[in-house]
Amino acid sequence: MRRKIFLVIAVLTAAITMTAAGPADLKDLRPGFNLFSSQQDIEVGREAAAQVAREQPIVHNSELNDYLASLVQRLARSPHAGTEFPFSVQAISDKNINAFALPGGTLFVYTGLISLADNEGQLAGVLAHEMSHIRLRHGTNQASKANLFQLPLMLAGGLAGNGLLGQLTQLGIGLGTGSVLLKMSRTAESQADYNGAQIMAEAGYNPIEMAQLFEKLEAQQGQARSAQFLSDHPNPGNRIQAVQEEIQQMPRRSYTADTRQFARIKDVVTHLPAPAQLHGQYNDGHTAPAAPDARPSRQSKQYQGRAFTFDYPDNWQAFGDPQSAMVTIAPSDGIVRDRNGNLSIGYGAIVSYYFQQSDEVQLRRDTDTLRIDTDDLVRQMLQANPGMSAAEQRGLKVNGYSALVTTLNARSPFQGETEIDQLVTVLRPEGLWYLVFISPQSESRDIQPILEQMLRSVRFSR
Ligand SMILES: [Zn+2]
């Protein structure tokens, strides 16, 4: 199954709605579904930051570096910056108007953006917005949703490779143009504005400055210098109004005005030497190997995870830390790599949990949560995988619980094959438990009893 880089654009409608005013109504946003651990966010971010430093002209000016570091430290003390990620910031010498956040805590700000800001609050606003993408883990959330099949295997460290980012690049999750780690959905934008406004207010800046900087950027729409930022951070609409409404709900505060230091920093930026520019490129290839002999044996062995156990064919291999909540089970011939090194699972099973953002769950009053959550997961899969289609859905029981089996058709990485994916879902306290059984269509009838045997063996631990 080939997975290409893909942009998840506002699959879920904007989660932030506001009604009556008052501090009690302020929300504390939390990260959404994610297959990465927080530690893996940090690991990917570190590798990516090193790559950025190799490819981009990083500013080495102690006055500018110290100023940016103190600004980020001040913002990081806000409770809404969280304590999970160690924040750091570097400036890139580039007249384009841009800033971006890598998973796990590293911020980059272009000197062009510093020049554009009217005051320190506006610059702080962009940084607070980017820090919110980090805290809410939007990059790896999007990468998780777009790569539900390969990531569990990769994140389990099942394949030897050259660092996590190197492996992710094989899935198309690199740092190139349109990277799923950097190009945000409108929902992620609303959330970063909302959380960023809280960070700003708690650090003593008027949150409206953040919205005003974005308006300033929008006013330049069509100009190449701000195109990358506006593409990576699409306007969720009514930014100023949304922040104004949020401020109404905050306790009254007096905010810092501009600082004299900021004027000095703008002067420093103006007189930096002009650098040469370098840009990375990501390539994707299309080749498929012949179908391997990966057919599952009828003998089984047990996978013992933290929250569930089940039996799987004894000639298949489990890739996953039993302490984590996800595992990929596959024959080594079932995992194929094309000439560009892109990984696909053509034969195997993936087990993990999926959940929706808490805001959306709260809005729901329906009883048929299993079907709604399953449909949401299926929607994510269809979005992430061009050429995939949902064929049918039926009910069954797994370990006594109601379950759904959704059958999907997809492109197979095996030559001349179509692929059948059978998605089994069960509601559990940890989220929507899912098992995806992947096989070439020509094999799917023969292996049906093996899937059924696997499902009969599933035991949830509580
Ligand atoms: Zn953003």
Image (cartoon, rainbow, N blue to C red):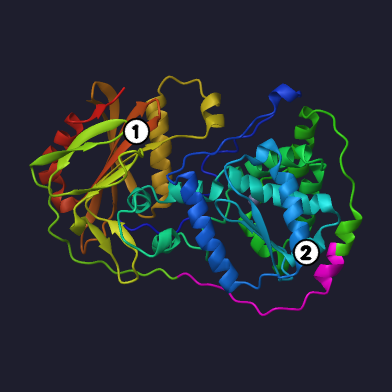
Left or right side of 459 for 82: right
Q: Nearer the viewer, residue 369 or 163?
A: 163
Where residue 63 sits, quadrant-wise, is bottom right
Residue drawn at the location 50% of the way across and 20% of the way down: 365
Residue, disc 2: 64
- The secondary element bearing badge 2 is classed as helix
Which badge, 1 or 2, comes first in the chain's sequence?
2
Q: Are marks 1 and 2 in contact (CB under 8 Å)?
A: no
Magenta segment: does it hold 128? no
Main SS of residues in magenta: loop
Position of 389 relative to 274 (above/below): above
Query: Counting other residues with Cα less than 10 Å from the Cα at mark 2, is it few (<14), some (14-19), or many (20 or more)?
Result: some
Q: Secondary structure at mark 1?
A: strand
Q: Which residues are magenta?
A: 265-282
Give coordinates of residue 302: x percent, y percent. 17, 37
Q: Is residue 254 visible?
A: yes
Badge count: 2
Q: Residue at x 14, y 44 (%)?
A: 313
Return the x and y of residue 101 as percentages of the image width and height: 61, 55
Q: Amino acid at mark 1?
A: Trp
Q: Is residue 279 magenta?
A: yes
- Disc 1 Cβ-to-ligand 1 distance below 8 Å: no
**Amino acid type, mark 2:** Leu
Q: Position of residue 413 (x, y in %)?
A: 26, 60
Badge 1 is on which residue? 433
